[in-house]
Each structure stands twice: as structure tokens, then as C-alpha cells.
Image (cartoon, grey):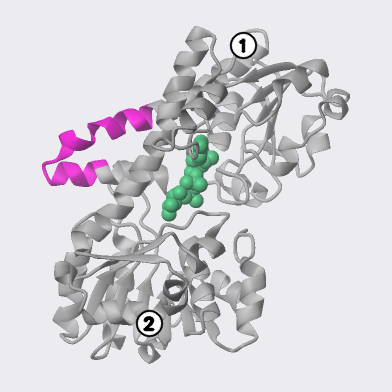
């Protein structure tokens, strides 16, 4: 099929490359010239495992091109909207200006029978509003909402083999032309058995908001248990293993630590609360306020624990922070708990040096006041405390004996509960985890 993908960020660049991999002819469109130049040269503009290999693979077939020129969409039958919906400044709601600009910019190039497919995470009601806009301009074009559930760090695989497809179309009608078009786009994964649900617009939009809210709630639940474990002298990691063995609960997303961050979960639960408020259903989601509060409290708790580790004062203490990305296998620092902790420590008088295998360039842009070092060795050199805040594999595998010879005082705060406390203590370290005795 002939496909255009509008917006080439974490979602769109991966989606464009994967659609070409599935055999379609794809043009990726974005207003950012630097991004388009890199993608055109088969380079990934951000770190995402497997993306660069995939870009090289599909570009050699000639099925994937990139441009800043929206008129290139005129050759396509399906147009995926993959632009961002960040949190509005000073408000909880989502900023819809990029989605609105993408759809408005696309209107002049729509022809009869075209299908516009929204993938961005949007407040419920957006699809119905955009469908009116599209059909007001081109009555024979269609709009569908097809939310994306990919995780950064696993984006290529999640796009090529998702858990499920959700199509939102008017009346949840199986016979809607957009359903047939999407079935053709995704014929390979559908043929391999991926489930697909057809829903109305509002349900499709809400599926995404509900999924992210559930994941955020699961993380905050276990972090709340970590608070109680800390107070009672219990171990939240054993507690998580034990409750996770009940398959109604499940062990996934029960890792207590410094909490969730990134470009999705934090802003999506806030936008969901804001939208529910507009709909008069705010009471239904007041629990998400608590989910958010528990999550933010973890960051303050880590700062307090670091102060305790440093014998009551952060003033002038040299703190080495391992990890800047909001999670491993990503260079994304949007709402990164690691960087937020690092910045709070620095504000309270510590001398903080941050290292990360992939995210330093993005971190410097966001927090220029912190010190950065691309080597773990020099980052931890003469440190009064080491904080593991993003669980990259190379940090999980650090040798406490080797590291012990480099720091000033062997104290470690394991912000993700991924180290073996017995091993670190045996090597002479003062070890603190979160929610562990
Ligand atoms: C999330 C959703 O998982 C994905 O389905 C959706 O499409 C976009 O938002 P992503 O932001 O890539 O994906 O990250 P995810 O893997 O969900 O992790 C989010 C945050 O939660 C990270 O900061 C991670 O460190 C944290 N986390 C995750 C925990 O603190 N504990 C856990 O047990 C799991």
C-alpha cells in the first residue's frame, strides 16, 4: 500500500520503517529538517535498538523515503498521524497543537477514499472532532483511531508484532472502509495471529489512556508497598515476587524503585484526569492523583536517603549518578526520575556527576547545570556516594570490588533494586535499596 507517516519522532520513525518492512511504500514527513536529513541517510535520530539496521535494510529496497514537504502525502492512500501530544505548560491537559497542525496540513492532499489513521495518544473526543474536520474538507475520506502501545527500547518489535490492534471507527462497524484498509496494512502480523478489536472512536481512544493508567497504577502500587516496607523493615522485592506468582496479579511492572517517567505515563495520566474533569467524570479518576503523588514522592525519598547515606548532609558531597535516561535501552530523558533526583541533589549543595551510555547529549540540553562524564570510572572517582538510577545492563553488572577501589567512600543507593545487597555488602559497601531493609 502507499502510506504516509506524519511525525517522525519515537513513534513515527519506527512506524514508518516498520510499515516499509511489511512491504508497503512509505513516505515519512516531519517539519524537523535535521531529523529528516538523518532519517534520509538511514540514521536513527535517537537511540532505539534495531532501528538503524531496519532503516538501512528497508531504504535499500527503495520503499522508504523521508521529506519535510507535506505535499508528498498526496501519493498515499493511508496517512498515519504520529505526532506528539505533550503536557500543556502549567496545566494537566494534553497540548493538541501538533495533532491539529498535522491534520490541517494534510487536508489539501486528501483524495476520495483516503484513510487518515490517528496513532497519537489523545483525549477522548479528539477522533470525532477530527473526523468532522476531514470530512468537511473531503467527504469521501475516512478517519480511524488506531492507538499505539509500543514501549521505547522495544519499539521495533512492538510495532512489527504487537499484542493487539485496536481500530476505532464510527459505530464500531466491521464493514467500515478503514477497517478493510487497516487489515491490509497489517496483513502480515494479523496473518501471524495478532488479535484485533474494532471499537468506536471513544473506546479506542480510552483503551490507550486506560492501559497507561493501569501500568502507572501498578508501579505506584508497588512503590506504596515499598514505603510501608521501609516503615516496617520488610523487603518489597520479595513481596513483589510473592504476590506476582498469583497470575491474576502478575510479576511484570511490579519493580519498586524511583518510579516511572518518560514521555508517556506521567503526562498521559495527567491528561486523562484533565479530560475526565471536562466530561464531569473527575471523581472516577481521583485515584490517579494519588498514583502521581506516590510516584513523585519516590524522587524526594531518594534525595532523603542519599542525605542519610552521606551522614546527614549533602553540602559539598560528591555524588555519582549512574543513569540519566528514564529507563534503560533509551536515550529519552523526558521526565526522567534519574535526572530529576540528580538536579534536586545538586540544588541541595551536592556536587553531582551523571553518566549514561546513551542519554548524555539529551541530558545536557535539559539540565546544563549538572556535571556529566561518559565514563563510569571517572564519574565514580572519589565519590562520597554512588546512585544507580537507571538500570542499564552495564550498571547491573558492575563489580563492587573494582568500584570500591575508585570511590572515596563505598556507599551505594540502588534506586532500581537490581543489585545483590549481600554481594555489595560483602565487598565493603554500605548498600541501600528502596523498600528493602
Ligand atoms: C509506556 C507503555 O508501556 C507503552 O505501552 C505506551 O505505549 C507508552 O508508555 P514507555 O514510556 O516506553 O512505554 O516505558 P515503560 O516501559 O512503560 O516504562 C515507563 C516507566 O516506568 C520507566 O521510567 C520505568 O523505569 C518505570 N517502571 C517500569 C518502573 O519503575 N517499574 C516497573 O516495574 C516498570
Secondary structure at badge 1 equals helix
Q: Are marks 2 and 1 in contact (CB under 8 Å)?
A: no
Cα–Cα span, label 2 and label 1: 59 Å
Secondary structure at badge 2 equals helix
Residue 276, horizontal then vertical, whole percent: 19, 44
Question: In the displayed structure, does residue 313 sit left or right of residue 261?
Answer: right
Q: Which of 397 and 99 is in front in this view?
A: 397
Q: Nearer the viewer, residue 78 or 270?
A: 78
The label shown at residue 184 is: 2
Residue at 46 percent across and 26 percent down: it is 223
Residue at 51 percent across and 22 percent down: it is 239
* Residue carrying label 1: 308
Q: Magenta stretch?
A: 273-293
The image quadrant of residue 416 is top right
Q: Residues within 10 Å of mark 2 (few under 14, many from 20)?
A: few
The magenta stretch spans residue 274? yes
Marks counted in the figure total 2
Which quadrant holds the C terminus?
Answer: top right
Which quadrant holds the N terminus?
Answer: bottom left
Q: How crowded is mark 1: few (under 14 residues within 10 Å), some or many (20 or more)?
A: few
Please identify the dominant SS of the magenta region.
helix
Residue at 23 percent across and 91 percent down: it is 112
Is there any visible trace of residue 322 in the rendered image? Answer: yes
Amino acid at each position: 500500500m502507499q502510506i504516509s507517516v506524519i511525525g517522525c519522532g519515537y513513534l513515527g520513525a519506527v512506524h514508518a520503517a516498520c510499515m516499509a518492512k511489511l512491504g508497503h511504500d512509505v513516505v515519512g514527513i516531519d517539519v524537523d529538517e535535521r531529523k529528516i536529513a538523518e532519517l534520509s541517510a538511514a540514521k536513527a535520530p535517537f537511540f532505539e535498538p534495531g532501528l538503524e539496521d531496519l532503516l538501512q535494510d528497508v531504504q535499500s529496497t527503495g520503499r522508504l523515503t523521508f521529506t519535510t514537504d507535506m505535499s508528498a502525502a498526496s501519493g498515499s492512500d493511508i496517512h498515519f498521524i504520529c505526532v506528539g501530544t505533550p503536557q500543556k505548560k502549567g496545566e494537566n491537559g494534553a497540548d493538541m497543537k501538533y495533532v491539529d497542525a498535522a491534520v490541517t496540513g494534510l487536508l489539501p492532499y486528501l483524495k476520495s477514499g483516503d484513510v487518515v489513521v490517528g496513532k497519537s495518544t489523545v483525549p477522548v473526543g479528539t477522533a470525532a472532532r477530527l473526523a468532522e474536520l476531514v470530512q468537511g474538507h473531503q467527504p469521501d475520506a475516512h478517519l480511524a483511531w488506531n492507538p499505539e502501545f509500543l514501549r521505547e527500547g522495544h519499539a521495533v518489535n512492538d510495532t512489527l508484532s504487537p499484542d493487539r490492534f485496536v481500530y476505532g471507527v464510527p459505530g464500531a462497524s466491521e464493514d467500515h472502509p478503514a477497517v478493510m484498509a487497516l487489515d491490509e496494512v497489517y496483513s502480515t502480523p494479523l496473518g501471524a495471529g495478532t488479535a484485533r478489536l474494532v471499537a468506536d472512536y471513544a473506546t479506542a481512544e480510552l483503551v490507550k489512556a486506560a492501559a497507561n493508567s493501569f501500568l502507572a497504577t501498578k508501579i505506584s502500587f508497588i512503590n506504596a508497598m515499598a514505603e510501608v516496607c521501609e516503615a516496617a523493615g520488610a523487603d518489597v522485592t520479595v513481596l513483589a515476587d510473592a504476590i506476582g506468582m498469583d497470575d491474576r496479579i502478575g510479576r511484570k511492572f511490579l519493580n519498586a524503585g524511583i518510579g516511572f517517567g518518560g514521555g508517556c505515563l506521567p503526562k498521559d495520566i495527567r491528561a486523562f484526569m484533565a479530560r475526565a474533569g471536562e466530561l464531569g467524570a473527575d471523581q472516577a479518576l481521583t485515584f490517579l492523583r494519588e498514583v502521581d503523588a506516590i510516584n513523585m514522592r519516590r524522587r524526594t525519598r531518594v534525595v532523603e536517603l542519599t542525605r542519610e547515606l552521606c551522614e546527614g548532609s549533602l553540602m559539598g558531597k560528591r555524588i555519582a549518578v549512574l543513569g540519566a535516561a528514564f529507563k534503560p535501552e533509551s536515550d529519552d530523558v523526558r521526565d526522567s526520575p534519574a535526572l530529576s533526583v540528580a538536579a534536586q541533589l545538586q540544588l541541595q549543595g551536592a556536587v553531582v556527576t551523571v553518566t549514561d551510555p546513551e542519554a548524555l547529549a539529551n541530558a545536557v540540553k535539559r539540565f546544563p547545570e549538572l556535571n556529566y562524564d561518559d565514563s563510569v570510572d571517572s564519574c565514580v572517582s572519589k565519590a562520597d556516594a554512588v546512585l544507580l538510577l537507571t538500570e542499564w545492563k552495564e550498571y547491573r553488572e558492575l563489580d563492587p570490588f573494582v568500584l570500591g577501589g575508585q570511590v572515596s567512600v563505598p556507599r551505594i543507593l540502588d534506586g532500581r533494586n537490581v543489585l545483590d545487597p549481600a554481594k555489595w555488602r560483602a565487598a565493603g559497601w554500605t548498600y541501600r535499596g528502596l523498600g528493602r531493609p
